[in-house]
Image (cartoon, grey):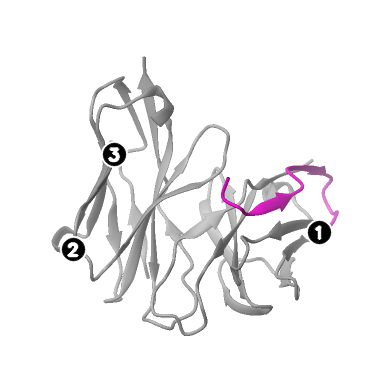
Amino acid sequence: DSGVTQTPKHLITATGQRVTLRCSPRSGDLSVYWYQQSLDQGLQFLIQYYNGEERAKGNILERFSAQQFPDLHSELNLSSLELGDSALYFCASSAETSGGAYAYEQYFGPGTRLTVT
Amino acid sequence: AQKVTQAQTEISVVEKEDVTLDCVYETRDTTYYLFWYKQPPSGELVFLIRRNSFDEQNEISGRYSWNFQKSTSSFNFTITASQVVDSAVYFCALSEGPPGAGSYQLTFGKGTKLSVIP
């Protein structure tokens, strides 16, 4: 058990809908990363939050957005869903500190499997 | 831009054989970090190891060992005396950034699917 929790585990929805994925990082971790895993694109970085602020953006579509709340949990919002958004969405947390010297390992949650029909 | 290549898509070995998973990376940064993750059939991603670019020491952990060679930009992973429980997809990953960068997103390879046959 990595200590990172994600809900829901599975989500089935229709095209055009909007969903919210939730992530709680490991206790004490301020940094949260979101990744998408699909068969054709592999594992791709979407976005990172650190202590409530967006820190980095990767290949995240404009239809997708995220936020991190004061209690450090994070939500990934996916809207106007398309069939191609079907994937496994992971969040990961890390013990990085602001201005810290090194990268730290990222611990991944169990993922949310999104199926768009 | 950074890139990670895992040329072996799938490998099958018989239990108790040794197996090496290859990873080659590309980066322009002088400070970078290399990782291996395991994804068993249940789907979660399990952290195995992190290596910093300034630390070329090889590492052994039980049946697992890692060989980091900057000269060939490789970070290979060897499982000794493989077991059925080692069956999984293994991902090599890279992050970059100087100290204090504050963001170390991972760039993953495509993964190597290892099947250990009893």
Amino acid type, label 3: Gly
Q: Single out the mark in the foreground, 2 or 1.
A: 2
- Which callout, 3 or 2, points at the residue further toward the start of the chain? 3
Residue type, label 2: Lys
A66 relative to B29 in the view: left or right: right
Q: What distance separates the C-alpha of mark 2 from that of mark 1?
A: 44 Å
Q: Residue furthest left?
A: B71
Q: Specify the segment rendered in magenta.
A: A1-19
CA gap, disc 3 and disc 2: 24 Å
Image quarter for residue B56?
A: bottom left
Residue highlighted by disc 1: A80
Measure the C-alpha gap from mark 3 to mark 1: 48 Å
Judge depth for marks 3 and 2 and give the one in front: 3
Task: Based on the picture, tell me whether residue A11 belongs to the magenta stretch.
Answer: yes
Residue at the spot of label 2: B70
Q: Which mark is residue B62?
A: 3
Q: Amino acid at mark 1?
A: Ser
Which element is circle 2 on?
helix
